[in-house]
Image (cartoon, grey):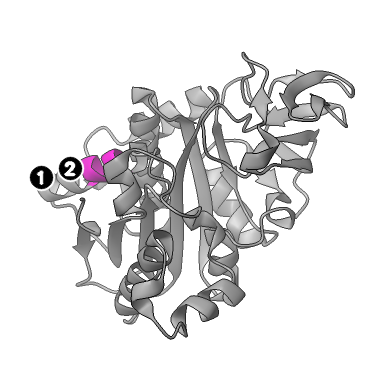
Amino acid sequence: MRERYIGTYGGYQTGPLLFVLGGIHGNEPAGVFGLEKVFQKLEAQAPHFRGKLVGICGNCRALAKKQRFIDRDLNRLWSEREIQRILHSSSKEALNSEEKELLEILSVIEKEKEGDFTARVMMDLHTTSAPGGFFSIVTPKPRNRELGTALYAPVIFNLNNSLDSTTNIFMDNHGWQGVAFESGQHDDIESMVLHEAAVWVMLEKVGCIHRDDIDNFQQYHDLLAEAAKYLPRFVNVVYRHEITPEDQFSMVPGYVNFTPVKAGELLGRDRKGMVKAPKTGRILMPLYQPQGEEGFFIAEELEKPLI
């Protein structure tokens, strides 16, 4: 099983804390690998660094098994209600695998957040089971939108209206700036490359580094800009198709993130029969993996951000 810490860097000069989670889902290792590359280059080049970078493994137990989760989705446990329930559990031994993971992560957060930081920023790195999963998810706060747009990827609004127990909710509840970043498909090598690029660009955005101190820094901007070239800039989630294992949901093959769909279009099947798109829009995160609580999302393209 992986160690919790992927790495730390800095902490000697005043500046922001950038706290990055990789692999909060065990079938999404690209964020872990991308972070490892960042720490290797930081150690090799030793740039002038303000603040501190902390990179940690999210669901270490599930990563070892290469599956999304063991007992429960770790990225559905971050509401205050769930956190308080787990923190005040009478028997820590009776907690399930992801509840134990959450306790360990919270302990690291409590330890690392202490210090004279100019800002506290969290970045949660993900991938999707379908191709084309390149986007940022933010909560409705301008400072978070700025972080999302800095990464070039489409910025997704209102996803948290459907998912109220993710890391984005934790960030808001605890006064952190932050963004969840999806870099592509799970097993695509480009997903790791884009995660690495996104962390570098975020380090520059929050003020930990200056681009002149890192060799060939423009490549990271170029990689992200190229990946976003034909994608919408802003989209608003208007529908979430919630599922359970009992539904036996199966997505129609071949869908890619941001593919346009029309109301009434056949998207999948479950034990009750055909599942059709309830709205016209663009499909997000069509499910092509065994585990998951959503079969797909539908979003509408926006001419300008909501916030």
Write down the residue under mark 2.
41
Residue 35 part of the magenta-drawn span: yes
Q: On the rendered structure, is 155 left or right of 98? A: right
Q: Quadrant of the C terminus?
A: bottom right
Residue 284 placement, left or right of 305: left
Q: Is residue 17 above or below residue 63?
A: below
Which residue is depicted at the point 58% across and 76% down? 80
On residue 170, which mark appears? none
SS at mark 1? helix
Mark 1 and mark 2: span between their CA atoms? 5 Å
The amino acid at mark 1 is Ala
Q: Which residue shows up at 60% across the image and 65% down it?
A: 169
Q: Is residue 222 above or below residue 105?
A: above
Q: Which residues are magenta?
A: 32-38
- Residue 115 position by quadrant: bottom left
Q: Which is nearer the eye, 212 or 201?
A: 201
Q: Nearer the viewer, residue 103 or 168?
A: 103
| The disc label shown at residue 44, or none | 1
Q: Residue at x 42, y 60 (%)?
A: 98
Q: Residues within 10 Å of mark 2 (few under 14, many from 20)?
A: few
As drawn, 31 above or below 91:
above
What is the crowding at mark 1: few (fewer than 14 residues within 10 Å), some, or many (at least 20)?
Answer: few
Q: Are marks 1 and 2 in contact (CB under 8 Å)?
A: yes
**Which amino acid type corresponds to the residue marked 2 in the rendered image?**
Lys
